[in-house]
Amino acid sequence: MPISIYHLLLLSSVICILFSNKNTIKFSFILSITFILYYSYISGWRDIGVDTNNYLEIFKSINVFSFRLYPFSYVNDIEVGFNNLIYIGKNLGLSFELFSFLLTITILLDYFISSYKVTNVINASIFILLIMLTYTSYQLTFNQVRQGLAVMIAFSAFMAIIQRKSIKAFSLIIFASLFHSSAIFLVLFIFLTKIKIKNNTLLLLAILSPLATFLHILENLILHSIELNIFNNEIIRKLNFYLLNPDFNKPASLNLSLLLSYFGIIALGLVIKNKKLNTHSDLVLSSSYKILVIGYFVYFLSFDFVVFSQRLLYYFDILYCFIISRLVFLNIKNTTFLFLFSSGLFLFSIKTIFYSVSWDIS
């Protein structure tokens, strides 16, 4: 299935959504479930590249269940949560293909449910479509990667933070870290988001955030932490592997993907700044944007160490999709906004075409 056909289907779906009756709950529900099933089928029974073959080997190699259920616990270099999930799946007789299919359904369905719980709006089809249109999310939902699960759980944690349910958010983040250790750093956001920041200040932070790349904070912090023996031996071994590997110990790259995201955040900030935040939906939007801006600022702080910065960014790209979909719902009668939104979708699709893996398989 050539990737051009894949994108044609996506963009056709966009047209159907934009010109449909957004108040039709049944239509939105059916469309969302259709997206979930369709893309889950592709994920399960197509070799889509990226890490597919790596995870096939991981699936074959796992043959033990571990009770060391705490962050930074590994079984043969695989986080304990993902190891145990595969072990259970294999013992239930699931093939790799069926395991991947069910995992993708779980990830996408969770986005649907988590979004609905916070917004009380069932029209989640645009949100799910946006997930499919972004490159990082494309990887994490189509590949049965460990961080894909962690991002899914982290999104639920972000929704809990927005609802000011700190204990729930903390529990979800700890749970997410069992599938990918990078999620543990999101605990900081429970506290960072409690800081009151005006929309004008947030917009200024978004504009100036690339300047944080000149501070070179993260790698120096990691090196000092290793020298002081703050981490256990397993973590130090992994950190040294990344630090000594030239493929990982390098800065993130300035590319089309990052530029689109950066200017998009500024545009979103201008829209939110000019909105009167009165309703529950508006406050959800404002809180989500606050997490997104802080997240991208931390990303630029860690820009010199790509293996961390890029993994961190995965968590916030999902929130990015959520914010855009909320703006669409809140401004659905504004034809100018719809035009800008459609243009944004087109740019997202170009971004995906430039960076997607090949589908040239038999």
Image: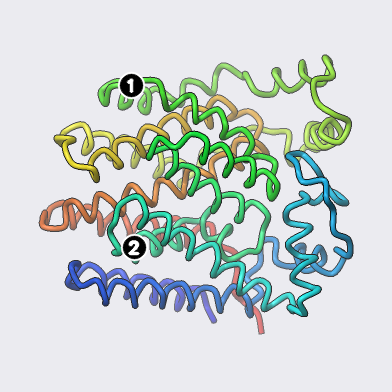
Badge 2 element: loop
Query: What residue appears at the point 61 percent right and 32 percent down from the top-left corner?
Result: 185
Task: Name the kind of residue labelled 1 in the image.
Answer: Ile
User: In whole angstroms, how far apart are the C-alphas of marks 2 and 1?
Assistant: 28 Å
- Give the residue type that dot 2 points to: Ala
> In this orientation, which residue lies closer to the viewer: 174 or 42?
174
What residue is shown at x 33% (from left), y 58% (from top)? 345
Q: Which mark is residue 124?
A: 2
Viewer-side residue, 69 vs 297: 69
Q: Position of residue 161 (x, y in %)?
A: 44, 37
Residue 120, image x, y percentages: 29, 56
As drawn, is 173 to the left or to the right of 109? right
Considering only order in the chain, which callout, 1 or 2, is on the residue closer to the N terminus?
A: 2
Q: Residue at x 31, y 54 (%)?
A: 325
Q: Which mark is residue 197?
A: 1
Residue 122, percent across and down?
A: 30, 64
Q: For residue 276, which quarter of the picture?
A: top left
Picture quadrant of residue 98? bottom right
Q: Which mark is residue 353?
A: none
Q: Residue at x 53, y 32 (%)?
A: 299
Mark 2 neighbour density, 10 Å: few (under 14) some (14–19) many (20 or more): many
The N terminus is located in which quarter? bottom right
* Vertical comparison of 178 with 263: above or below: below
Q: Is residue 104 left or right of residue 345?
A: right
The x, y position of residue 176, in whole percent, is 62, 47
In depth, the one of 290 and 175 nearer the eye is 175
Tell me: 214 left or right of 338: right
Q: Is residue 207 left or right of residue 110?
A: left
